[in-house]
Amino acid sequence: MKCTRIDLDSWDRGKLFQFYINNMRIVMSLTVEISVTPLDAYIKDHHLKFYPSMLWVVSRVINAHDEFKYSWDEEGHLIKWDSVSPSYAGFHQEDQNFTKLVTLVTEYSDDLFEFHARFLADRERYKNARAVMERQPPNFFDASCLPWVRYQHFDVHVFDEGKFLAPVVTWGKYEREHGELMMPLTMNIHHAVADGFHLSRFFNEVQEVINSLS
């Protein structure tokens, strides 16, 4: 995993970043309904599963933009990862418990089929594990799913020092409406690294990636 240390004095967002980190630690949260109709058709045609395919879609958009790849190194310096991968939870229907799969955060790949295969291998490896797995790789973002409800808004509060910079992405149940499969998608992101423009672009590009599947 490679990263670049950020020089706040020369970074074009440096002063704004320092203002939000030092004076006003804000996390923005936005939920947008997207159409997953093309994704549903694509995965059925190619015998893929929805959850890892959707993980790949959001990972692709997140990795396309710097604002979603910032973090801190062990010495407290701001860094930007070359790539980030999703950290997610596996739900066990038989006992209604979760496994937080953070030991081997499924490594992102630009190729959907490669990522899908990695996800299935990771899930099989930890199918009998429960609770939180340790030794989380540092270049991650959080992803979760609430497949039981089509919500209108969802918010996650990270109770640290207010310096958690990675995106937190969540989606809910998709349902048919006017011929389209509509699904709520949420992102939480620190205002120090992103503005409303960047947040809005994420949803627009997620829809573009889904629409491009054929």
Image (cartoon, grey):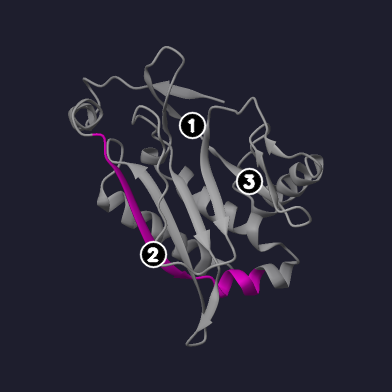
* Residue sitting nearer the eye, 168 or 14: 168
Report, in whole angstroms, how far the alpha carbon at label 2 lies from the one at label 1.
27 Å
Q: Quadrant of residue 134?
A: top right
Label 1: how many residues lie within 10 Å, few (<14), some (14-19) or many (20+)?
some
Is 186 displayed left or right of 120 in the figure?
A: left
Look at the image and give the residue range highlighted in magenta. 25-42
In percent of the image, x 55 and y 68: which residue is there? 173
Residue depicted at 50% across the width and 69% down the height:
150
The numbered dot on residue 32 is: 2
Q: Which mark is residue 146?
A: none
Residue 205 at x, y percent in the picture: 42, 59
Instruction: For the C terminus, give its image quadrant.
Output: bottom right
Q: Are marks 1 and 3 in contact (CB under 8 Å)?
A: no
| 35 sits left or right of 24 in the view | right
Distance from label 1 to label 3 (Cα)?
24 Å
Q: Nearer the viewer, mark 2 or mark 1?
A: 2
